[in-house]
Every structure is written in structure tokens, then in C-alpha cells.
């Protein structure tokens, strides 16, 4: 099979922090393995402190305590979330059939949705129709962890490179980009709308009962990936737009969780029925959009605010 391999280098600076042990680079290295595949960014090895302090704004009880995470070698992660267009190509080429989750013995057909008052599955909603208008360059949502894993395996077969759903440590390491603050832009919630599509004043006009950031990003729902400023690794939407699946099984106690970038999949529940989304979405206020925050959702769960991006190995 012929693999179309296109490497490119973006001439934008990476302002890494040497005190965090992150390899200093002058430029952001990117590559795309095939036409229509996600553009991947090379993330440099190093270490950063993940998790949150007890006094951090919006901290949740289930968050990891602040701990040093070390990535021993460079890896790649998608520059943006997987888009509707990219996921559509996967579905058309593979004829993939999603698993339908079961709750209380009944199938959950469709996708979870929020109407301003309550959440619930809507049978007519799907990745093609999450309940609000989307463009082809918006992040795909209403996809499960199982769907994301199938997409990554398809990319691996298609390109010959090992793609995967990123681990929680890889995701937070990539999101922080050397920072130790609640968000990669710093500590000020008012700056959020320069960097992320989150629950803002525009969102609050439609959903006034939801907590929001004190700024306006101009979008109620998802928007085109890469529209907002990137972090210092050149990654967009690591906060907001769509929650993103990570590969780790959900663990209540994180004291023994790996901090080397590997996924924690040896859950006592052998089926690993719960996974760990991160990053927040267009609906997320201050507490639910920080680098340290995590969620807990079934591996076959689908939500109108939950998508993914992929990670990959670097070929030497």
C-alpha cells in the first residue's frame, strides 16, 4: 500500500520553559500522513507538573493532586480535534457501526443532549446531527470512546503509523505546554475567549442558568477547529470546543496513576467500561475547563459536547 507522507514545518516559535525540562525548539514540527488525515504536532519530551493544588480556582475533589509527570520521548498529537469532515471519511470508507450502550437493560439510542433544563438521550441525534448546526470543520461530537479508538486504529492501518487515543497524562502535558497555571494562557478567566470556545457570555445569553466565563467568544455551540489562539506547543482547542476522550480507564484514586505518559488501563473492572474525558467544551464554565479537570463517562457513551483527537508515535 502506498502511503502519502507529507512533512511540513511551521515557522512559529515554541516558547518552552527549560526549568520544566522541556526540550527547547525554535520551530513547531508538524506532519500529515495522508490526504485528509489529521495534522499532527510533534510534542517535545520533558516534564511538567500536572493536577491541581487544593486552592486552585474551581478545583474538583476527583482531580489529581499536583505531581510531576515526565515524558521520556517526543510524541505527536493532533493539532486540533478530529473534525466532522475527517470522521465522515472514516465512516464512509469503513462502514463502521457504533456500539449502542445499555442502561438499566435498555439501549441508549442516539446522543445525550441538553435543552437548557435537563440532559437526556435523543434518539434522532448523532455525530451527523448533534442537535445544533455544525460545519464540516467543526469538531465531531456524539462519538464514543469506542468510536475514537476505532478511528485511531483505522488511521494506523491506513498510514502504517501507530495512532491511538491519547492518555490523560499525554493530554494534560500537551495542554499545559510547560505551564503550571489553571489554563495554558495563565490565571485570568477574562482571557479565555482569546484561546478557547467555552461557556462565555454568548453562551449564557442562550443558557442563562449555566455558569460562564466573563468574556465573549462569539459562539454558542462548537465552531471551526483552530479558530482560537494555540498554546505554546502550537495546539488548538486543548480547552473548550469539545470535551475529548482519553484512553485511561476512570480511576477514583489517582495516587498510583502512571505519570510517564502511559495509559492506566488495568482497572479492576476488566472491561474498563468507564473512560476519562478531559479539556472541557463550549458548554464549560471556569470549573470544568481547566487543564487538571477530568470527567467520567462510559466507553460507549455519546454526548453533544464530547469529541476527541488522536496521538501517534514518532518514527525515528
Image (tube, grey):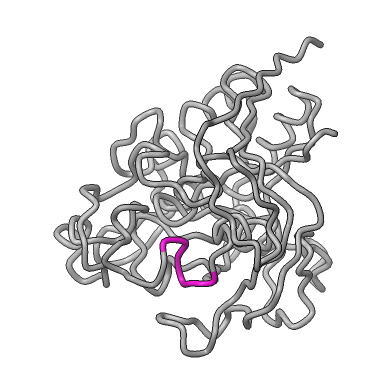
Q: Up-down: is 253 above or below 169?
A: below
Q: Nearer the viewer, residue 151 or 217?
A: 217
Residue farthest to the top?
2
Q: Quadrant where the N terminus lies?
A: top right
In the rendered structure, the answer to whether residue 21 lies left or right of residue 147 reads: right
Q: Nearer the viewer, residue 17 or 44?
A: 17
In the rendered structure, the answer to whether residue 316 lies left or right of residue 140 reads: right
Residue at 18 percent across and 61 percent down: it is 201
Q: Up-down: is 174 above or below 183?
A: above
Residue 283 belongs to the span the image colors magenta: no
Residue 183 belongs to the span the image colors magenta: yes
Q: Position of residue 267 (x, y in %)?
A: 79, 70
Q: Position of residue 20 (x, y in %)?
A: 66, 67
Q: Main secondary structure of the magenta part?
A: loop
Residue at 54 percent across and 71 percent down: it is 180
Which portion, as a residue range, is magenta?
A: 180-185
Q: Position of residue 241 (x, y in %)?
A: 39, 50
Q: Position of residue 59 (x, y in %)?
A: 47, 82
Residue at 51 percent across and 66 percent down: it is 291
Residue at 73 percent across and 53 percent down: it is 45
Quadrant of the rendered image containing residue 10: top right
Amino acid at each position: 500500500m502506498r502511503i502519502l507522507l507529507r512533512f511540513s514545518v511551521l515557522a512559529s516559535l515554541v516558547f518552552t520553559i527549560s526549568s520544566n525540562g522541556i526540550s527547547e525548539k525554535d520551530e513547531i514540527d508538524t506532519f500529515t500522513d495522508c490526504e485528509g488525515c489529521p495534522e499532527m504536532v510533534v510534542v517535545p519530551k520533558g516534564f511538567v507538573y500536572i493536577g491541581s493544588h487544593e486552592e486552585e480556582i474551581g478545583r474538583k475533589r476527583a482531580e489529581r493532586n499536583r505531581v510531576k509527570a515526565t515524558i521520556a520521548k517526543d510524541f505527536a498529537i493532533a493539532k486540533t480535534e478530529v473534525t466532522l469532515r475527517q470522521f465522515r471519511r472514516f465512516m464512509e470508507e469503513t462502514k463502521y457501526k457504533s456500539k449502542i450502550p445499555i442502561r438499566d437493560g435498555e439501549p441508549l439510542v442516539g446522543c445525550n443532549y441538553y435543552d437548557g433544563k435537563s440532559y437526556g438521550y435523543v434518539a434522532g441525534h448523532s455525530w451527523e446531527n448533534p442537535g445544533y448546526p455544525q460545519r464540516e470543520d467543526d469538531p465531531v461530537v456524539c462519538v464514543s470512546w469506542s468510536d475514537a479508538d476505532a478511528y485511531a486504529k483505522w488511521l494506523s492501518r491506513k498510514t502504517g503509523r501507530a495512532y491511538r487515543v491519547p492518555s490523560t497524562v499525554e493530554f494534560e502535558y500537551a495542554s499545559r505546554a510547560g505551564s503550571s497555571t489553571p489554563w495554558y494562557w495563565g490565571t485570568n478567566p477574562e482571557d479565555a475567549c482569546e484561546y478557547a470556545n467555552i461557556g462565555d457570555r454568548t453562551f449564557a445569553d442562550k443558557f442563562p442558568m449555566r455558569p460562564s466565563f466573563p468574556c465573549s467568544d462569539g459562539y454558542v455551540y462548537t465552531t471551526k477547529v483552530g479558530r482560537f489562539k494555540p498554546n505554546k506547543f502550537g495546539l488548538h482547542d486543548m480547552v473548550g470546543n469539545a470535551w475529548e476522550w482519553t484512553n485511561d480507564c476512570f480511576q477514583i484514586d489517582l495516587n498510583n496513576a502512571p505519570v510517564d505518559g502511559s495509559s492506566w488501563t488495568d482497572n479492576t473492572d476488566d472491561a474498563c467500561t468507564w473512560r476519562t474525558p478531559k479539556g472541557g467544551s463550549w458548554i464549560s464554565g471556569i470549573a470544568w475547563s481547566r487543564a487538571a479537570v477530568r470527567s467520567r463517562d462510559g466507553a460507549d457513551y455519546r454526548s453533544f459536547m464530547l469529541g476527541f483527537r488522536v496521538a501517534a508515535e514518532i518514527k525515528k
